[in-house]
Every structure is written in structure tokens, then in C-alpha cells.
Image: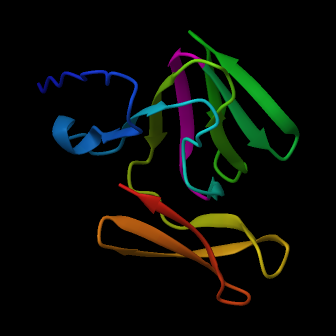
Amino acid sequence: MKKVAIERSDGSARVFKPLAGDLETDGLAINYFERAPGEHIGDCYHRHLEQEEVFYVLSGTATFETEDGDVEVGTGELIRFAPGEWQQGRNGGDDRLVVLALGAPRDDEPMDLRRTCPSCEERTPAVPEEGNGEVVFHCEVCGAETGRYAW
């Protein structure tokens, strides 16, 4: 048995806590997020090819961009994405968003990532490069930087 406490922030910082390692889960990814209004939960519009993902909104309102349009998920609600479904979540409300994300299987490869490229002027495949406490994304088509995500 493993037990982990999650201390909520004072609301001044973007929070991401991967919990699967601390809980030593083998087949389940568990991530805790806190986001200010307008901030994204993840760093790309994406789809997991083998992993299903469930988001439980502990407080606030999450808005998920999907192929079928935006879907709002409020406090106490859950949303599931099957393998292959495109999505990106953000805090779509006026209050701080707190979300618990569960994914199985835990180690999901491969994954499709998309970001809007300023040079190509459309959403293109994104190539991440990790280093110095952040991920830098580049357009797979032209190589332009499409964004940064700090840990």
C-alpha cells in the first residue's frame, strides 16, 4: 500500500504533480493539475494511440477542445477520452481549475501532438525537445518553434 498527500497551492502558481511514481502504479498514470483561468492542462492538442484518459474536475470548469467541438466539464464531473480521440483541456472558467487525470496503460507510446505553427499558419505535428526544465516544441513541417512548456 502507498499513500500520498496532495497539498493544494495558494493559487499563485501553475501546478503539475505526477503521482504514479510516488504511488508505484504499474499500469495507471495519475497526474494532478491546478491551472489559472485561460491556462491549458496539457501543452498540445493531442491523442494517445493506446491510452484511454479520464479527467475528474475537483473544482472549477475545464473546457476540452475536441474534434466535435468544445466540451465543458464542471466540478464533480468526469470526462473520458478513448485511445485515438483528439483533445486538449484548459481552464475555461473564472476560478482556479483543479483536475485529476488518470490514464491507462501508464506508459503510452506513441502519441500524436499538434500545435499551431506561426510560419505554416495551421496546426501541424509538433516535435518536443526536453532540456533545462522545459520542453520546446518545433513544427515538424518547417522547424519553427511553436511553443515552450516549463516544468
Q: Residue at x 45, y 34 (%)?
A: 102
Taking depth in this image into account, of 85 and 58 the one nearest to the observer is 58
Q: Residue lying furthest bottom in this view?
A: 142
Total marks in image: 0
Q: Quadrant of the C terminus?
A: bottom left
Q: Main secondary structure of the magenta part?
A: strand
Taking depth in this image into account, of 146 and 82 the one nearest to the observer is 146
Q: Residue at x 63, y 31 (%)?
A: 80
Where on the picture, by quarter, is residue 1?
Answer: top left
Vertical placement of residue 10 versus 140, above or below? above
Q: Residue lying furthest front in this view?
A: 12
Position in image of residue 10 (x %, y %): 33, 21
Is-magenta flag for residue 142?
no
Vertical placement of residue 44 versus 59, above or below? below
Taking depth in this image into account, of 56 and 98 the one nearest to the observer is 98
Find the magenta span and give its range: 49-60
Is-magenta flag for residue 54?
yes
Position in image of residue 110 (x %, y %): 54, 67
Position in image of residue 84 (x %, y %): 69, 53
Q: Residue at x 34, y 44 (%)?
A: 27
Vertical placement of residue 118 versus 71, above or below? below
134 sits left or right of 139 in the view: left
